Amino acid sequence: MRGTRSQSPWGLLYTLLTLLSFLFFSEATEQLPLGPPADATPKRVAIIGAGAGRSFAAYELRKLAKSAKIPLNITIYERESYIGGRSTTVDAFDDPEYPTELGASIFVQVNANLVNASREFGLGVQSASNDRPDETEESLGIWDGKDFVFTVKSGSTWLNLGRLIWRYGLAPLWTQNLMKKIVGKFLNLYEEPLFPFRSLTEAAAAVNLLNVTAASGTEFLSANGISSRFAREIIQASTRVNYGQNLPLIHGLESMVCMATDGAVSIDGGNWQIFEGAVKASKANVHLNTAVTDIVRGDDGSVHITSKSTLGVDGSESSETGFDEVILAGPLQYSGISISPPLEHVPDEVPYVKLHVTLLASPHRISPAFFNRHSSKEIPESILTTLPEDLDLGSNPHGVGPAGFWSISTLRTVMRTVVKKGQEQQEQHYVYKIFSPERPTAEFVADILGLDWSHDKGPVSTPKVNTSIGDLPQSDISWFHEKFWHPYPLLYPRVTFEEIRLAPGVWYTSGIESFISTMETSALMGRNVAALVVQSWQNRKDEKGDDRSRERSEL
Ligand SMILES: Cc1cc2nc3c(=O)[nH]c(=O)nc-3n(C[C@H](O)[C@H](O)[C@H](O)COP(=O)(O)OP(=O)(O)OC[C@H]3O[C@@H](n4cnc5c(N)ncnc54)[C@H](O)[C@@H]3O)c2cc1C
Ligand SMILES: *[C@@H]1O[C@H](CO)[C@@H](O)[C@H](O)[C@H]1NC(C)=O
Ligand SMILES: *[C@@H]1O[C@H](CO)[C@@H](O)[C@H](O)[C@H]1NC(C)=O
Ligand SMILES: *[C@@H]1O[C@H](CO)[C@@H](O)[C@H](O)[C@H]1NC(C)=O
Ligand SMILES: *[C@@H]1O[C@H](CO)[C@@H](O)[C@H](O)[C@H]1NC(C)=O
């Protein structure tokens, strides 16, 4: 579960998972290149977007081309001003001392691509909840809109384990075993003979995961004998904080991935540094603030790319021609790229979750009154949510329910100098992160923090219908940052996944998001595409070689 302490009962329950971890590293020993023949023209690859997927595609392409001695020239286009895509930080209080994840925040020990790369790039890894203030009696609570259905007490492992078994029996252990089995199947995709895979559908079938993605979380868990109480209160709290979805909607595989949390970490200073490291290692030419608008596929198989600067009102246009391959941005539906002639396989539009991430700082603790409790000490530092028992969401299986938000967590404390009654003084402020399906209103934030505020206060008596956090006084909200994301797809049960090669020379990494949507799986698909691209070059070379030997024998 995101943001729980490694010493927490989750940690204890999930230590079995470490069997699956890749904890031993060694520098990949690469052959020294002999250098390309002087006349060889480099293969030219255009990569659109510099998030997890394509930065790893670039990184792997460089590695493979080097060992196959294929000269290579990579160009990356990124419409944002930064590398990392959905993995990015903002600085709390606009102070570089406090970088805070705005998108993807954690990865886990089984995520070998990210773990290995962070080691290779010399990045510091920290426990995902490193900066938590640890001031309350409970570190984690699961709120159903009315009550905390389960809480984790700070620092008492055995007590927590007892409470867990008391409430759920052995369901936590069965879940753990089931998750290990599923993760074990998934990890086969990392290795020969399956890796690299041309079709994710076929690869998923080969590792027997299609019947896991075919079922909803609810169906999959009940078929495997997991009690509905444990599923609703614990597993669903996890699918909600991780994917903004409830178990009747999200498929069985992703529900299990949410329970694979052993060794949850993040990179000191921001996870985006892994992807920056990958881009650097790829030696690509990087064009930031540059959005690709058009792709034209020539008759000779070469690709022509038109891009536009995203700086200024009327960004200048430029184009480059003669690429051998292009790796498309994803999700394609949000990329604004037109492709002609049309692709052989056009990725289906996939519905995405709409998520508001709100970071805010305040001298106030979370209000006990909001959660029907007496003192701040009783409010868990991380609050996840679930649906109450017997609530029928009807036709809206992805509704947030009476809780109204997916999660609220206390990230850290920061000492601030404030002026009160003309006196400078030090004041402790808390930095919070809220995940919600709607933009939080001023009323909601005021209620959560127990502020005495309402929109009809002040000289203007007409009520403001559309208040937001910015309407609250700076003395109560000392800093905030709001971001709307399309973070991950709605993970409906399905048995087919998007093609990887969309046309000759045109590749797509984002189909994997409907299978498992994480930084790691995007990185895996990026490497997979790189391996397929290099394979296709080698096959073509072999074919040419065969042609030549045939010609020779005919002579
Ligand atoms: C709030 C949030 C929380 C999350 N939490 C986690 C988590 O804890 N752990 C985890 O593993 N995952 C998490 N995820 C999911 C994770 O961020 C994504 O699965 C992963 O980062 C996707 O990487 P990607 O490279 O496939 O796509 P992206 O990161 O979206 O990269 C695509 C890039 O393409 C660029 N682009 C698009 N169109 C164009 C164009 N026309 N021209 C040029 N550039 C273009 C975009 O600007 C972007 O940089 C979270 C996501 C969000 C938003
Ligand atoms: C990670 O590193 C380990 C140890 O060097 C290696 O065995 C494994 O194949 C690597 N995995 C990936 C996905 O890079
Ligand atoms: C790569 O291609 C670009 C043109 O897109 C060119 O400017 C650059 O010099 C090339 N780099 C190498 C190392 O060949
Ligand atoms: C799913 O596939 C696995 C194959 O490994 C099998 O053990 C299991 O019975 C299958 N489940 C269903 C519901 O078909
Ligand atoms: C509320 O405000 C936001 C931005 O401040 C705006 O985008 C939205 O359209 C407004 N909604 C209504 C109902 O006025």
Image: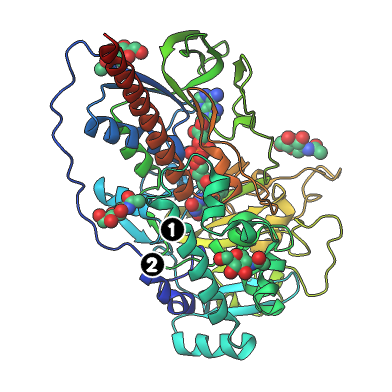
Circle 1 is placed at which residue position? 187
Query: In which quadrant will I find the C terminus?
Result: top left
- Looking at the image, is mark 2 or mark 1 nearer the viewer? 1
**Image height of 466 relative to 553, above or below:** below
Q: Look at the image and tell me whether residue 372 can be seen.
A: yes
The quarter holding residue 259 reads bottom right
Q: Residue at left 45%, top 28%?
A: 81
Please tell me in which quadrant of the rendered image residue 445 appears: bottom right
Q: Is mark 2 within 8 Å of ligand 2?
A: no
Query: Cβ of disc 1 within 8 Å of ligand 2?
Result: no
Residue 470, given in percent of the width and then of the height, sits at: 65, 44
- The vertical placement of 113 against 295, above or below, is below
Residue type for callout 1: Leu
Q: Identify the residue at image location x=57%, y=13%.
A: 313
> In the rendered image, which residue does mark 2 sit on?
20
Mark 2, Cα crowd under 10 Å, few <14 / some 14-19 / many 20+, is some
Protein image colouring:
rainbow
- In this rendered view, identify the residue nearer to me: 332 or 499: 499
Q: In this rendered view, identify the residue nearer to me: 178 or 99.
A: 178
Marks 2/1: CA–CA distance: 9 Å
Cβ–Cβ below 8 Å for labels 2 and 1? yes
Q: How many marks?
A: 2
Q: Position of residue 76 (x, y in %)?
A: 41, 24
Give above or below for 466 relative to 476.
Answer: above
